[in-house]
Image: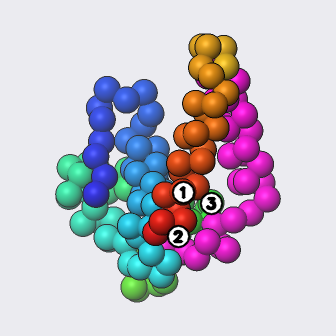
Amino acid sequence: MISLDYKDGRSLHEQIESGLKELMVSGILASDEQLPSVRELAVSLTVNPNTVQRAYKQLEADGFIYSVKGKGSFVASVASARDAAHTEELYASLTSIVKELMYLGEEKTTVENIITNVFSEKEGM
């Protein structure tokens, strides 16, 4: 499901958050699917439950998941996760990454092919 890299510069809760987002975006976790409890995920990743709770709180704040009292956390629909501010942040990140790739001498067609492949994978689901 999610793997943590202790050599990664990001904190553990950021890695958990990123891993769960990747599972949601790739369709492995579907809308309204229940996530593991904080305790279950903490045990499976061998981290402190507070670390998982922090990741879940951020995912909920970003609209990727929602909580039902007494039931747990669930994957939100795409419409819930999509807000203008978050979309702008993602475009800013994409722009920064593309500029860095240009600086490193990557070809425009290579970057375009990656983007096209990502869209093709989504269409194939």
- Disc number at residue 98? none
* Sequence-wise first label, 1 or 2: 2
Give the Cα separation between the discs numbered 3 and 1.
26 Å
Q: Nearer the viewer, mark 3 or mark 1?
A: 1
- The residue beneath circle 1 is 120
> Residue visible at 48% across and 81% down?
32
Q: Is residue 115 above or below residue 35?
A: above
Element type at mark 1: helix
Between residues 53 and 83, which one lies in front from this camera angle?
A: 83
Q: What are the residue bounds of the magenta stretch?
A: 75-101
Residue 49: % across, % down: 31, 56
Describe the element under mark 3 as helix, strand or loop: loop
Q: From the viewer's perspective, is 60 left or right of 103?
A: left
Kindly report which numbered mark, 1 or 2, lies closer to the viewer in this rendering.
1
Q: Is residue 9 above or below residue 62?
A: above
Residue 94, image x and y in percent?
Answer: 67, 38
Q: Quadrant of residue 87?
A: bottom right
86 is within the stretch colored magenta? yes
Q: Which residue is mark 3?
A: 62
Q: How many numbered discs?
A: 3
Q: Main secondary structure of the magenta part?
A: helix
Residue carrying label 2: 65
The residue under the point 28% across, 57% down is 1
Quarter of image, res 42: bottom left
Scheme of image coloration? rainbow
Q: Label 3 vs label 2: CA separation? A: 8 Å
Q: Is residue 97 above or below residue 44?
A: above
Q: Disc 3 marks which amino acid?
A: Asp
